[in-house]
Amino acid sequence: MMKELVEIIAKALVEHPDAVSVQEVEGEQSIILELKVADDDMGKVIGKQGRIAKAIRTVIKAAATKEDKRVMLEIIQ
């Protein structure tokens, strides 16, 4: 569910939605979501001073309250 949520948000922000991919890495106490976007869309996902990335992380944390694990978002190239 978290993976789909990040994918929907990211695809709405970028110019190349087909280049968006989300990998879910599950550990014992946490879930790491790795978001990849096209190089020229990186700024749109991060935003000025990281505001958009912070907002996405806030939405994910709110949605993760049902999970017993900590959910983290990493934006990678």
Image (cartoon, grey):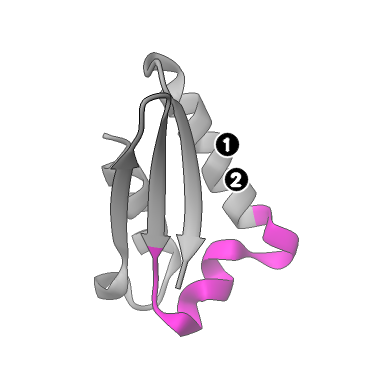
Callout 2: SS:
helix
Identity of the amino acid at label 2? Ala
Contact between marks 1 and 2 (CB within 8 A): the answer is yes
Q: x%, y% of residue 17? A: 30, 70
Q: CA distance from mark 1 to mark 2?
A: 5 Å
Q: x%, y% of residue 68? A: 40, 15
Q: Which residue is mark 1?
A: 58
Q: x%, y% of residue 25? A: 32, 44
Question: Which quadrant would the N terminus be assigned to in this image?
Answer: top left
Residue drawn at point x = 36 percent, y = 26 percent: 28
| Residue that protrudes farthest toward the right in the picture | 49
Q: Within the image, what quadrant is residue 64 found in?
A: top left
Identity of the amino acid at label 1? Thr
Front residue of 26/22: it is: 26
Q: Which residue is mark 2?
A: 55
Binning the other alpha carbons within 10 Å of mark 2 as few (below 14), some (14 to 19) or many (20 upward) gives: few
Callout 1: SS:
helix
Residue span colored magenta: 36-51
Question: Which quadrant would the C terminus be assigned to in this image?
Answer: bottom left
47 drawn magenta: yes
59 vs 28: above or below: below
Residue drawn at point x = 58 percent, y = 73 percent: 43
Q: Within the image, what quadrant is residue 49 found in?
A: bottom right
| Residue that protrudes farthest toward the front in the picture | 28
Is 55 situated left or right of 71 in this image? Answer: right
Binning the other alpha carbons within 10 Å of mark 1 as few (below 14), some (14 to 19) or many (20 upward) gives: some
Q: x%, y% of residue 69? A: 42, 22
Is 25 situated left or right of 70 in this image? Answer: left
Residue drawn at point x = 34 percent, y = 77 percent: 16
Residue drawn at point x = 37 percent, y = 19 percent: 67
| Residue that protrudes farthest toward the bottom in the picture | 40
Magenta span: helix, strand or loop, mainly? Answer: helix
